[in-house]
Image: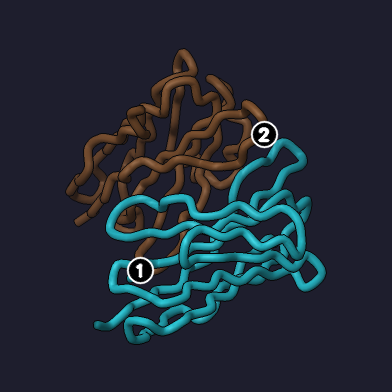
Chain colours: A brown, B cyan
Amino acid sequence: EAGVVQSPRYKIIEKKQPVAFWCNPISGHNTLYWYRQNLGQGPELLIRYENEEAVDDSQLPKDRFSAERLKGVDSTLKIQPAELGDSAVYLCASSSLAGGNNEQFFGPGTRLTVL
Amino acid sequence: EDKVVQSPLSLVVHEGDTVTLNCSYEVTNFRSLLWYKQEKKAPTFLFMLTSSGIEKKSGRLSSILDKKELSSILNITATQTGDSAIYLCAVRYSGGGADGLTFGKGTHLIIQP
């Protein structure tokens, strides 16, 4: 079974540039999460989707961050414009609601460096 | 504000030693506590704990939850160099439309040969 797929794996941009990350969750997983992980920290939730609906985006900096999950499958996370402090690893995770299993499967992440 | 605190933040031991990693939490609407192992890539799931006093075991790893003390421990016996990783504790919460994980900062474990 394929895991959570993310691309790109690495991205280096200059500040004020836009950037987008893509995530393809495990087939059949209704719930999709975007996390940001700074160096030496645990992942922090940015947004959670149930199918195509963003049900928890309270931690998403909405002035520059946006996300979408059209059709309730793939998702993109965008930053425009990027700032130096946005350098981090952006992790996508998915889980299935079936059986109330709380296990989240993580993708490999996108390491963003903003210069 | 919900929070998850792990200790120690880093630990260096020799192969064969036994280690105990700690996690304490303060969250509203607690649902479960999860342990993850993170090497160079994304976190991989180890355990999910929902009930106090019931030990979960997988090989040399074991974990237990104490809901009265709002804490959990992760034990690794007979450590191997392959156990070197960051071990993340996360607490699942729900309510008010929110349903996610709050992670601790992790314990960076280094096993020396």
Residue B36 located left or right of residue B55: left
The residue tagged 1 is: B83
| Residue B87 horizontal/vertical position (percent) | 45, 66
Is A29 drawn above or below residue B44 in the view shown? above
Residue B83's spot in the image, x, y percent?
A: 35, 68
**x then y, percent, for residue B26:** 72, 65
- Residue at x-position 36% and y-position 41%: A107
Q: Are marks 1 and 2 on the same chain?
A: no
Residue position marked by numbered label 2 in the rendering? A100
* Relative height, residue B42 to residue A22 (above, below): below
Q: CA distance from mark 1 to mark 2?
A: 29 Å
Q: In what quadrant of the picture does the C terminus of chain B appear? A: bottom left
Q: Of the residues tagged 1 and 2, which is closer to the observer?
A: 1
Residue type, numbered disc 1:
Asp
**Residue A57 sits in quarter:** top right
Please tell me how crowded label 2 is: few (under 14), some (14-19), or many (20+) other residues with Cα within 10 Å: few
Q: SS class of the residue under badge 1?
A: helix
- Which image quadrant is residue A1 in? top left
Decide which of B94, B16 is in the foreground and name it.
B16
- Which of the two residues, A45 or A31, is positioned nearer the viewer here? A31
